[in-house]
Image (spheres, rainbow, N blue to C red):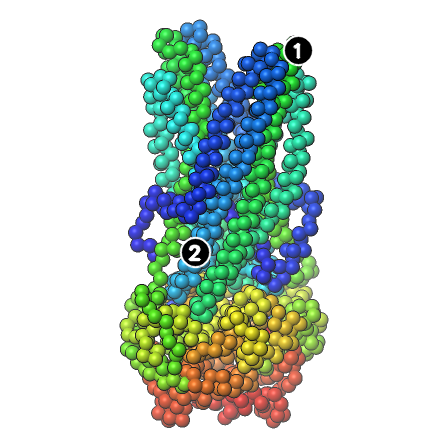
């Protein structure tokens, strides 16, 4: 009943698409390896699993004794007319049933408990791993699909690991017992009954090959549904603004239908397989009837043996049917497990070197030494950029859109690693220090002002959740956000809705600035931080910043040149390189691109 | 959202209503089920017959023919169960598919105000997991219930025939059983609602974390995020563990009660046999049939929780489907005729939330073909005003008229087809740039698309990319620079060739040189059409026919640049602040 989602279908994401289709060719061995690794999640819980298993065996045994007790009650006590003995047997039966209840309940609880534990810890592990993966990973994967892995696929694995594994072991034990009993009754008849087993194996083999593909298909299709829905929800305003509800409905219906069909296909396979197993069971009965019947006719065997055999053959096929149903679940779980493990196995491209040290308190000298960078191998974005920012300086980056300004800011914060060259802060290559110690001393106001759902106060104190309200207000005042926040009915406690939609864009930027100020950074990066803020408010923020920035380094990206008039150095970035640098006056005098941009405004 | 609470039965009935289009195969599946049951019950009898008559009498010929007959019977059973399975699955998968389509359609219909309040994580869990639960109950689960009920009724009748007194005694545990089952269901329902909510919270946390990954990293808050997620995760765990306990200890209780019924039958029945009221044969038959009853009863124990879950799932899904759409076509709304471009606000007041007015009694009229600039401090209500023109929200008081038509009286599609909006926040889809631009007008030709891209100054940068128009952008366009995203969005809107164009800060992330090129292109493209432009830059303002100065939801001044610079203090301040740089 858990929803099971794999990864993106076609047209869903940039790189994820290619990745998924590359993996299609995984062989059978892969399958077993994944299964083994999934089993590994059970190891910490072995005492509980063992207890559950023992209880399961006890309860199976108890369940088997009750028919026997009934037989005794009827054959011995009732026929003999012994009312007292009948009473005691009935009491004994009641006791057995109570014991059966107790063992079943405890065993069920243990199994669910272990399952839930595994589920919870696996989700926590995935979440932790997602925190380690760099921004580039997240940009290449659809959020909805990642969600479906953490929430959905994990749940399917749980089904297998908790109830699945226990059932498999329990059934196998029962099966082995029955085989022994059958062999001890009559070897020949037993062997002829087992003759259907090769057929069973063949059926399972044929089924499992198709089932794996089919069930993997269902996960991918469901992921496409989740991804498509998530994307349409986040783009709903555009869809409505363009009156494109019809088109998006058609597109969604398509992935939705594909998901439905994939599920029907996969289940149809099971609907062939399960009756086949059932049929083979009756076939075994028929063989026993035939061979046994002829043997009885020849006088080689007693009727009683045949009857006993028939009872065991039907018992024999019960666990086999259970197991083959389990097989379907296993296919789902393994398909899900593949995705989850793949995510856990993804190596982060940006990681702390083992020898990385903590960044000492930053003075603020930032040097970009001959850096080149590209997001994708064949499309260089920056080449050979050299820039020195002295401690305490404010440097402005201006230039045409798409020139690489945001990219430079990304590199300084080490959200990406340079392809060549080095980013050096206070003489230390940023790759030699731990990411956390570096970023703790930086503050970033991103170009798109992202806020989390939660109160305004919580958003401002994102970098220090424990800090006092007074500090929050101070930061808000510096960002000139205090006035509008206090004018809101709930002030700082106002809940920001998803995507920050209940604030104007400019207001969101102000809160982002307050958030960066509160982080008390040594290096402040403002990427178009006030692009949507009116000039009056911007002027006020600048005055506040000027006081705040004393002794701190700042990198400011802006198109509106009024934003950067106080910069110590202005760099004009074009096509991935710095083409002009100097102060405002120098640049105007030089008569280059800067002057042109300036005159146009 | 929903006004009245539906009862559990009502919710279930509504879920099953979705089976109606598939009633043929559903009925076929239920008939097939009966057939399978009949065969299943026949086979043991047949085997017994073979043993008694064939093997017992050592009749080899009869054994051979009857064994073949058995195999034929088994084959028939297999074939029918295959179809039964497929039909059930097809019907229930279709229910899920239809429900998801309905949710998607409803989300597309629900206006901005609903989406302001809703959370993606919550919507996703409902559309995926809750629908899955409904699917389960409308498919196999209910089939099993029906199966059990048929079996139970048949067996009960048999029991009553054999010995009414004993039967009633055996049935005496029934009320207890039903009561336990019901109370289990009743206790599970609120709990599963809480769990589902918690899972939604977990999903939302994850979603927020993924969307804000740059912020999390830039502020080195990974550990705090992990702790926060762990907290929700633990809560989910303890809630689920509680439910698991409830289920583990109460589910088998149903089994226990049924089993104790058997004990009573054997004990009291045995006593009856001993006192010669009942024959032994009758008691054995009785015990056998009673044994058959345990199967459906045990099933009940498993299915009660599933039903409880399905009911909560249904409630959550129908909450979306029943949500009231605040902006929708009035009955009898007519399409808006080709627009000339006159836009009038009559005494418009508006607030996003009750009691918090953003716009106060706004009135103005814009002539066709004018370029109107809106200027004002952050949060003064500029975006709010333009949100009312394509009817993203309806005014609380007053009317918005286009060419004299109250826009509430025309169809939404015809209105939005003629009003092109570039929203302040750029959202692109995770697909190729081509598809993103063509989103504006799916049937447009190549030349038309390139013309739009050129006007938005996007063509050049697109061509510089290795894959050109086929470049796939990240979710929401994350793999483009801010200005590139905005230009693709502008191209998307221009391609629609709207009669009224709204640019909400559409070039905030574009450099001044490029912006000017866009303006020049727009001038010829938009000649004779009404334009609303929101911008902070002076360069934009100088071109406007009229500038509205907004302050706290009111228009405090309007006029041309030259007039305002003299008459309006706020405008002069805003202007001066930016012009200062030239004085430096
Ligand atoms: N995540 C990414 N993956 C691939 N390419 C990217 C990514 N981010 C940016 N680019 C490309 O890198 C180039 C530089 O982008 P960048 O965001 O640095 O520009 P910018 O100077 O900040 O522009 P703007 O002023 O528009 O914000 C652009 O061509 C852009 O398409
Ligand atoms: N969806 C919403 N729900 C509740 N309040 C909102 C919503 N959208 C905006 N507001 C509030 O309405 C006011 C006006 O917002 P609006 O977006 O119109 O401002 P704006 O003039 O466009 O500002 P900016 O220049 O920053 O874009 C603000 O105080 C904002 O907090
Ligand atoms: Mg940028
Ligand atoms: Mg706005």
**Residue A397 seen anywhere in this rendered image of the structure:** no
Front tag of 1 and 2:
1
Q: Is residue B330 left or right of residue A262?
A: left
| Image region (quadrant) for ligand 1 | bottom right
Q: Position of residue A302 (x, y in %)?
A: 61, 11
Q: Position of residue A156 (x, y in %)?
A: 55, 45
Q: Is residue B446 above or below residue A562?
A: above
Chain holding disc 1? A
**Residue B82 seen anywhere in this rendered image of the structure:** yes
Q: Is residue B566 above or below residue A239?
A: below
User: Under tag 1, what secondary structure?
Assistant: helix
For the residues bearing labels 1 and 2, Cβ distance under 8 angstroms: no
Q: Is residue A195 left or right of residue A47?
A: right
- Residue closer to the observer: A413 or B104: B104
Q: Is residue A74 above or below residue A565?
A: above
Q: Count up the numbered dots.
A: 2
- Tell me the residue at 55%/20% (across/down): B47
Identify the mark at residue B103; answer none if there is no mark. Answer: 2
Q: Is residue A207 left or right of residue A236?
A: right
- Tell me the residue at 57%/35% (across/down): A274
Q: Is residue B517 above or below residue B145?
A: below
Q: Position of residue A349 (x, y in %)?
A: 66, 61
Whether disc 2's CB lies below 8 Å from ligand 2 is answered no
- How many residues crowd around disc 2 within 10 Å: few (fewer than 14), some, or many (20 or more)? many
Whether disc 1's CB lies below 8 Å from ligand 1 is answered no
User: Under tag 2, what secondary structure?
Assistant: helix
Q: Quadrant of residue B24?
A: top left
Q: Quadrant of residue B169?
A: top left
- Tell me the residue at 60%/11% (across/down): B58
Chain holding disc 2? B
Residue indicated by mark 1: A298
């Amino acid at each position: 009943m858990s929803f099971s989602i794999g990864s993106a279908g076609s047209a869903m994401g940039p790189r994820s698409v290619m990745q998924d289709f590359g993996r299609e060719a995984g062989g059978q061995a892969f399958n077993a390896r994944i299964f083994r690794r999934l089993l590994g999640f059970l190891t910490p819980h072995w005492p509980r699993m063992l207890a559950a298993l023992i209880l399961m065996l006890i309860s199976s045994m108890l369940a088997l004794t009750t028919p026997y007790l009934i037989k005794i009650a009827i054959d011995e006590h009732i026929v003999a007319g012994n009312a007292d003995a009948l009473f005691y047997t009935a009491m004994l039966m009641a006791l057995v049933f109570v014991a059966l209840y107790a063992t079943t309940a405890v065993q069920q609880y243990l199994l669910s408990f272990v399952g839930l534990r595994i589920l919870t810890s696996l989700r926590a592990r995935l979440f932790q791993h997602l925190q380690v993966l760099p921004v580039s990973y997240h940009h290449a994967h659809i959020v909805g699909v990642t969600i479906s892995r953490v929430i959905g696929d994990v749940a399917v694995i749980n089904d297998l690991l908790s109830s699945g594994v226990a059932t498999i072991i329990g059934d196998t034990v029962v099966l082995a017992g029955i085989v022994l009993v059958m062999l001890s009754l009559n070897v020949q008849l037993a062997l002829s009954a087992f003759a259907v087993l090769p057929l069973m194996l063949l059926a399972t083999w044929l089924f499992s090959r198709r089932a794996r593909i089919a069930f993997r298909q269902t996960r991918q299709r469901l992921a496409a549904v989740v991804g498509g829905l998530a994307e349409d929800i986040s783009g709903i305003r555009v869809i409505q603004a363009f009156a494109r509800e019809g088109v998006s409905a058609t597109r969604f219906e398509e992935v939705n239908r594909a998901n439905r069909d994939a599920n029907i296909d996969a289940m149809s396979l099971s609907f062939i397989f399960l009756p086949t197993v059932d049929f083979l069971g009756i076939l075994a009965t028929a063989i026993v009837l035939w061979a046994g019947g002829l043997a009885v006719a020849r006088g080689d065997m007693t009727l009683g043996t045949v009857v006993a055999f028939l009872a065991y053959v039907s018992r024999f096929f019960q666990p086999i049917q259970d197991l083959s149903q389990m097989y379907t679940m296993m296919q789902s779980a393994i398909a899900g497990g593949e995705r989850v493990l793949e995510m856990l196995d993804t190596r982060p491209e940006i990681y702390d070197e083992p020898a990385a040290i903590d960044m000492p308190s930053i003075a603020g000298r930032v040097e970009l030494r001959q850096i080149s960078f590209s997001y994708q191998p064949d499309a260089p974005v920056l080449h050979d950029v050299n820039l020195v920012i002295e401690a305490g300086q404010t440097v402005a980056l201006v230039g045409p859109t798409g020139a690489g300004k945001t990219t430079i800011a990304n590199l300084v914060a080490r959200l990406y690693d340079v392809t060549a060259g080095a980013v050096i802060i206070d003489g230390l290559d940023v790759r030699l220090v731990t990411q956390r110690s570096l970023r703790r001393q930086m503050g970033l106001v991103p170009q798109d002002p992202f806020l989390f759902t939660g109160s305004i106060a919580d958003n401002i104190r994102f970098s220090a959740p424990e800090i006092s309200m007074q500090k929050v207000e101070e930061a808000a005042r510096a960002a000139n956000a205090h006035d509008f926040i206090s004018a809101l009915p709930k002030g700082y406690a106002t809940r920001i809705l998803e995507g920050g939609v209940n604030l104007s864009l400019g207001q969101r930027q102000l809160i982002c600035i307050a958030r960066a100020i509160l982080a008390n950074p040594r290096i402040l990066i403002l990427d178009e931080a006030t692009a949507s803020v009116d000039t009056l408010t911007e002027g006020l923020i600048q005055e506040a910043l000027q006081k705040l920035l004393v002794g701190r380094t700042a990198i400011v990206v802006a198109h509106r040149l009024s934003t950067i008039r106080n910069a110590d150095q202005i760099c004009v970035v074009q096509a991935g390189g710095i083409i002009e640098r100097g102060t405002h006056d120098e640049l105007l005098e030089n008569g280059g691109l800067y002057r042109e941009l300036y005159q146009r405004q | 959202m929903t006004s009245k609470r539906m009862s559990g039965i009502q919710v279930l009935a509504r879920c099953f209503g979705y089976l109606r289009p598939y009633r043929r195969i559903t009925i076929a599946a239920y008939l097939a089920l009966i057939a399978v049951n009949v065969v299943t019950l026949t086979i043991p009898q047949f085997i017994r017959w073979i043993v008694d008559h064939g093997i017992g009498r050592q009749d080899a010929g009869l054994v051979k023919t009857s064994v073949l007959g058995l195999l034929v019977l088994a084959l028939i059973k297999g074939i029918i169960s295959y179809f039964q399975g497929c039909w059930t699955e097809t019907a229930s998968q279709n229910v899920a598919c239809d429900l998801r389509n309905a949710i998607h359609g409803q989300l597309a219909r629900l206006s901005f105000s609903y989406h302001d309040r809703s959370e993606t994580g919550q919507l996703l869990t409902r559309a995926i997991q809750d629908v899955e639960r409904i699917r389960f109950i409308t498919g196999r689960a209910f089939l099993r219930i029906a199966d059990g009920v048929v079996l139970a009724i048949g067996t009960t009748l048999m029991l009553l025939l054999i010995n009414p007194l004993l039967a009633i005694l055996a049935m005496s545990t029934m009320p207890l059983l039903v009561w336990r089952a019901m109370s289990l269901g009743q206790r599970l329902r609120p709990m599963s609602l809480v769990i589902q909510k918690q899972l939604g919270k977990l999903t939302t946390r994850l979603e927020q974390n993924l969307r804000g990954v740059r912020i999390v990293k830039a502020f080195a808050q990974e550990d705090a995020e992990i702790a926060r997620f762990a907290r929700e995760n633990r809560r989910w765990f303890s809630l689920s563990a509680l439910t698991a306990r409830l289920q583990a200890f109460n589910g088998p209780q149903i089994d226990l009660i049924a089993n104790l019924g058997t004990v009573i039958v054997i004990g009291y029945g045995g006593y009856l046999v001993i006192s010669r009221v009942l024959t032994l044969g009758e008691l054995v038959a009785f015990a056998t049939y009673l044994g058959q009853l345990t199967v459906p009863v045990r099933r009940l124990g498993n299915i009660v929780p599933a039903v409880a879950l399905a009911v909560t799932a249904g409630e959550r899904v129908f909450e979306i489907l029943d949500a009231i759409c605040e902006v929708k076509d009035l009955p009898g709304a007519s399409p808006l005729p080709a627009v000339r471009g006159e836009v009038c606000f009559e005494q418009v007041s508006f607030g996003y939330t009750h009691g918090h007015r953003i716009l106060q009694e706004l009135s103005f009229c814009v002539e066709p073909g004018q370029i109107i600039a809106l200027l004002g401090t952050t949060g003064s209500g500029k975006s709010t005003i333009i949100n009312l023109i394509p009817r993203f929200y309806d005014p609380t008081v007053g009317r918005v008229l286009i060419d004299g038509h109250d826009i509430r009286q025309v169809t939404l599609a015809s209105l939005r087809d003629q009003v092109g909006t570039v929203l302040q926040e750029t959202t692109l889809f995770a697909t190729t740039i081509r598809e993103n631009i063509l989103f504006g007008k799916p049937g447009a030709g190549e030349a038309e698309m390139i013309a739009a891209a050129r006007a938005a100054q996007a063509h050049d940068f697109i061509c510089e990319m290795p894959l050109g128009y086929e470049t796939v952008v990240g979710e929401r366009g994350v793999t483009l620079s801010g200005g590139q995203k905005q230009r693709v969005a502008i191209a998307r809107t221009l391609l629609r060739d709207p009669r009224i164009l709204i640019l909400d800060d559409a070039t905030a992330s574009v450099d001044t040189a490029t912006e000017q090129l866009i303006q020049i292109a727009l001038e010829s493209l938009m000649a004779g059409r009404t334009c609303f432009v929101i911008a902070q830059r002076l360069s934009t303002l100088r071109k406007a026919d009229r500038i509205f100065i907004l302050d706290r939801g009111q228009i405090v001044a309007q006029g041309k640049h030259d007039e305002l610079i003299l008459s309006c203090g706020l405008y002069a301040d805003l202007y001066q602040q930016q012009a200062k740089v030239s004085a430096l």
